[in-house]
Image (spheres, rainbow, N blue to C red):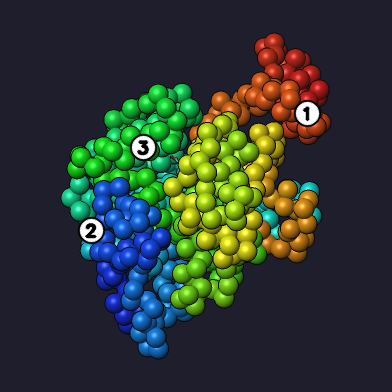
Amino acid sequence: MAASREPPHAGRLTPGMNDNLHQLRCFGCGDRIAGPDARPDFRCVQCGDLFEVEYAGWSLRQGTNRPNPGALKWLWRERRCSSETLDQSGVWRFRELLPILDSYGNAVTLLEGNTPLYPLTRSARRLGIDQLLAKHQGMNPTGSFKDTGMTTALSVAKERGFEWVACASTGNTSAAMAAYAARAGLRSLVLIPEGKIAWGKLSQAMDYGAVTCQLKTDFDGCVRVLAEIVQHEPIYLLNSVNPYRLEGQKTPALEIAEDLEWNVPDHLIVPGGNLANSSALGKGFRELRELGLVARMPRISVIQAEGANPLVRSFAANHGKELEPVEAHTRATAIRIGNPASWRKAVRVIQDSDGWCLDVTEAEIAIAKAELGAEGLGCEPASAVTLAGLKKLRVEGKIGSGETVVLVLTGHTLKDADYTIDFHRGTLLREEEIAGHNAEIDALRRNAFVVEANPAAVVAAMKGSKG
Ligand code: F0G
């Protein structure tokens, strides 16, 4: 895998930008440490909070030393036509904003990122919004946004000589980790809550060769067990407490800004589970603004499932100052998380960007998912909370018709085919959950017909079907 040859003048315009110049800054007490000095659980020794990757050199870059925004924009676009491996990754294409490796030769990539930004014309029309777009992170190599963060964090694991990597997961992280570990020739250990993740995701971890342990607990219980294991075993933790995950996960912010000709949308809407993705995207937009690549931040709102809404409760109870863990229940298993690790970071993103945090019901999630499917996109249930949340924000008058809104769809529709089939068969939701939504659900359901094997019966089924 070769690092790309920089065009000579762009290199001159961005001096030193390929140096590994990062440090870790504690999000709680502000303590700074060198990257390799982090504890195995990535918690601050002083205060127990999480770290954020910081690039001290950037703030010193005044005048001629400051990265030249025009040169970076040119260089990143130019790389889209390059045949070099790293340039073809939608994460490493932006490596000037990811100086976390000593050598880019250690980067482990599946050519992640470069995901589409689709217009959602029908939903936009229905909601009376001028421009509604979906950033479909499910179009990544293992079918979720986790790939963007796994390529960066797993590359660090490889560079630092680890043989084993591990994560607790609601499914997607484990699928991504297992794939990237396999590419790098590392062993991987997956802890998942028994019976509470979608089969598609479990099958991926097995296929990519992970040691997959289904624990008789929930996601939060898996996190606790793993935190103990990494204290004693030489295993590199790849949950999103690992700050290098968030560095990769910030790059969709760069892609969105680039796709909008270096404008930012008015509003970005993200699902909230462990709350790393919203934190990472917020960091991405913040850094773009600080480096002068865009003029402002979008408003960033986080949507949770009603049965797994600790952050919503925290905002309601104390404006995001404290978080009381909840026992989480939702069919959107990816975000079935009651004690989110990155909640403080997400609070900062929501507050700094003037965003909102709200929750949506099981029926609202299922309807939104079917609507996205009917637009030819589809996504997994956790992703559909974004559209469900947008509808609520629109009804509450918090989003104007002239705004550009981007929904972050986090996972591919095939991740959880059982959910989709149950919805269309009418077996997903209980009656009390459907109350008030009957007409909407009936209009969206498309159950498969069982038809006699003759043309007349098929044509009759076709003509009798809903439009
Ligand atoms: N959407 C999907 C499809 C997810 O898999 C997750 C998280 C989220 C949204 C929420 O993102 O946790 O950063 O707020 N899945 C994790 C996992 C927890 O283990 O795969 P978050």
Q: Mark 1 vs ligand 1: CB under 8 Å?
A: no
Q: Residue at x 43, y 63 (%)?
A: 80
Looking at the picture, how far across and down is residue 79, in whole percent? 40, 66
Pick whichever of labels 2 and 1 is earlier in the sequence.
2
Pick whichever of labels 2 and 3 is earlier in the sequence.
2
Q: In whole angstroms, how far apart are the C-alphas of marks 2 and 1?
A: 54 Å
Q: In whole angstroms, how far apart are the C-alphas of marks 1 and 3?
A: 38 Å
Question: Is residue 410 in view?
Answer: no
Q: Which residue is more in the foreground, 427 or 136?
A: 427
Looking at the picture, how far across and down is residue 31, in whole percent? 33, 65
Residue extending farthest to the top is: 452
Looking at the picture, how far across and down is residue 321, in whole percent? 53, 55
Q: Residue at x 47, y 63 (%)?
A: 283
Q: Secondary structure at mark 2?
A: helix
Q: Residues within 10 Å of mark 3 (few under 14, many from 20)?
A: few
Q: What amino acid does circle 2 point to?
A: Asp
Q: Secondary structure at mark 1?
A: loop
Q: In whole angstroms, how far apart are the C-alphas of marks 2 and 3?
A: 22 Å
Disc 1 versus disc 3: nearer the observer: 3
Question: Is residue 224 in view?
Answer: yes
Residue 37: assigned label: 2
- In the depicted structure, whether residue 415 falls above or below residue 317: above
Q: Which residue is more in the foreground, 213 or 349?
A: 349
Examine the image and state in which quarter residue 129 appears.
bottom right
- In the depicted structure, whether residue 20 falls above or below residue 335: below
Q: Secondary structure at mark 3?
A: helix
Residue extending farthest to the bottom is: 63
Q: Residues within 10 Å of mark 2 (few under 14, many from 20)?
A: few
Q: What amino acid does circle 3 point to?
A: Arg
Look at mark 3 in the image and give the residue it sits on: 224
Q: Which residue is more in the foreground, 431 or 159?
A: 431
Look at mark 1 in the image and give the residue it sits on: 435
